[in-house]
Image (cartoon, grey):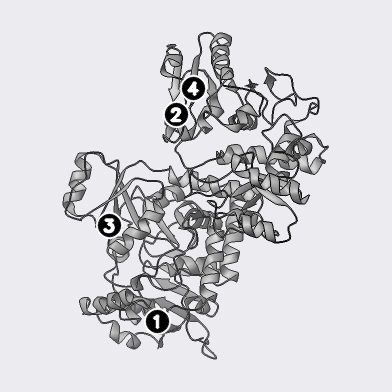
Amino acid sequence: MLEHPTVPALLAGHSLVIGRRRCAQQPLQAVLVWGQKPSGRWGEQLARRRGLPLWRCEDAFVRSLGLGPDSPPLGLLLDDTGIYYDASRPSRLERLIGRDHSDAELERAAALQRLWREQRVSKYNGAPEAPAPAEPFVLVVDQTAGDLSIQLGQASAAQFSAMLAAALAEHPGRTVVVKTHPDVAAGRKRGHFRTADLADPRLVVEAGGGHPTALLERAEAVYVVTSQLGFEALLWGRPVRCFGMPFYAGWGLTEDALPPPQRRRPRQLDDLVHAALVEGATYIDPHRHQPCQVEELIAALGLQRRLRHSLPSPVEAFGFTPWKQRVLRRFLAGQRLRFRFRWQRPGGTTALVAIWGRRATPGLLRAAARRRLPLLHVEDGFLRSVGLGADLIEPISWVLDRSGIYYDATGPSDLERLLAEGHWSATQLERAARLRQLLVARAITKYNLEAPPWSRPPGAQRVVLVVGQVESDASIRLGAPGIRTNLALLQAVRQAEPEAYLVYKPHPDVVAGLCRQGAGESDALHCCDEVLVSASIQQLFAQIDALHVLTSIAGFEALLRGVPVHTWGLPFYAGWGLSHDRLRCGRRNRNLPLDALVHAALIDYPRYVSRHSGLFIEPEQAIEELLAWRAGPRPPLSLRQRIFRHWGRLRRR
């Protein structure tokens, strides 16, 4: 139990007394042991000696991302009667399955089954899915030798041979897949089948420790002794035959080789699901280790699965600085990742080449094209951090683009293709609307910088804001085929809006001295009425009548707040009927609702990683973390950050 640091959080509301000496001396309400393991015998004796209730705990049926101490349990079963895998006596879970559930509880259980399948989760969730055969098949599930659930489930090693023989005999002409336990695949334990047992030509052994979802989804039938995969097979709607007496057998939901205990009477699958996943266990979220509902944990683990296994592997990353290498490891979690220098070439086993933005060398591009290796372009997301990336403030979001990159209008990107071809349901658009409203209400922008307030000039009829950019930025080089300097933009806006009160806001990196001013930008005041070197872009949105940009992300942020936006380049949000555009892109010929743009740009396209857990999160969770980050104290710049800032100033002079 002490190997699992999450156990105290999973027992929220209880105070743990740990150690034999302290337990013997202090007043206790109950004694807690882990399952039926021999390590709990002293606790059993203590409970009898002091007349205390004995509680047993075990991993919940949805446990964690991976195996081992690096993935401690996020769900825990507590039983004050017995333990769920001991069929010889009652257990709390058995009692919960047998009770009558309300309509609301049964509806929740049915929704949980759908969620389980949609998120494609299992007890452990770190491995890629084991491939399912193309032809029809049945699934036979092995377990680790000596597993207590076998003996206490009224079975023995002999049942595994009988199970395999039955699967072969009852499905003539069908492929039979034998799935080994992940611990056996990892070499930590052994299973029940020897090589000689698996000689039949119809047998296919899945010994890679793969995730069982695809197998459970497609199997015509599932054969188990006492494995949890029998329960999961029921969630997938598969027929299950049991050769032992696991907790889900004996309720009329499985075909059982053994007679069930008289305590068990026919129940609905929803009764079993509600008892096993809702009532019988406690859960914590994987980021803050705070109590949560099972639905929240399933969704969080499903998100990890989708993103960790969405790209081919291994990945080689070229030209990433040591600081970005550390960040990339988080955003490519689940991938085998190797870092190379910019001038090197991909290795022989590479499946994907990662580069920062458009910074690949011509030689690398030629080598990747020659070998037909896909490129992965990495960049900051649109909700990034509290502070500037140029100050080495780590991001909460990055985008990974396999077609191009969102700011490069010379060719399509994943985001552009999504906007051009995507379709969003009413539910998805409602989610995007809530996200947009949350961003506006909580004043969230890309960098979330603090600045002194600014007031609209009294009597000004029309106030127009022009946002400057770093002129060396790739978004101008690749997304502004006409005007390319801040001064030229100001001059054009002055000509287009001669009567307006014109405000110019330089880019924060330029104001901070991290990037060089554009050509003639120091003369900006000759073309506008005011230059704001320190002002919050969020605060300005509420006081202006229009915004003019080249390709700045500020245009997207203004659209979210209902500010009319005029684009003079081709940013990703231009060309969809939402902004006033001076230029056109032939690939963008579709009008979209604002919330379709929001869903594509803030939900579908980026990845978000928690600052606390290092795991993937949803954009709504990222906003919560940004708000807490912004409200907290500002740590001083580290020595490395100060050196980088000073070096950047010198380099850009």
Mark in front: 2 vs 1: 2
Asked where in the image residue 85 lies, by quadrant, the reply is top right
Q: Amino acid at mark 1?
A: Tyr
Give me the C-alpha separation between circle 3 and circle 1. Answer: 29 Å
Residue carrying label 3:
358
Q: Amino acid at mark 4?
A: Val
Q: Amino acid at mark 2?
A: Pro
Determine contact: label 4, label 3, CB under 8 Å.
no
x, y percentage for residue 363?
16, 50
Residue carrying label 4:
178
In the rendered structure, find residue 504 and report the number of the disc placed on it.
Answer: 1
x, y percentage for residue 415?
42, 52
Q: Amino acid at mark 3?
A: Arg
Work out whether mark 3 precedes mark 1 in sequence or the reverse, and give the earlier one: 3
Asked where in the image residue 94 lies, by quadrant, the reply is top right
Mark in front: 4 vs 1: 4
Mark in front: 4 vs 2: 4
Work out whether mark 2 precedes mark 1 in sequence or the reverse, and give the earlier one: 2
In the rendered structure, find residue 131 and report the number of the disc placed on it.
Answer: 2
Is the residue marked by circle 2 packed among few (<14), some (14-19), or many (20+) residues within 10 Å?
Answer: some
Give me the C-alpha separation between circle 4 and circle 3. Answer: 47 Å
What residue is shown at x 59% (from left), y 20% (from top)? 221
What residue is shown at x 72% (from left), y 35% (from top)? 272
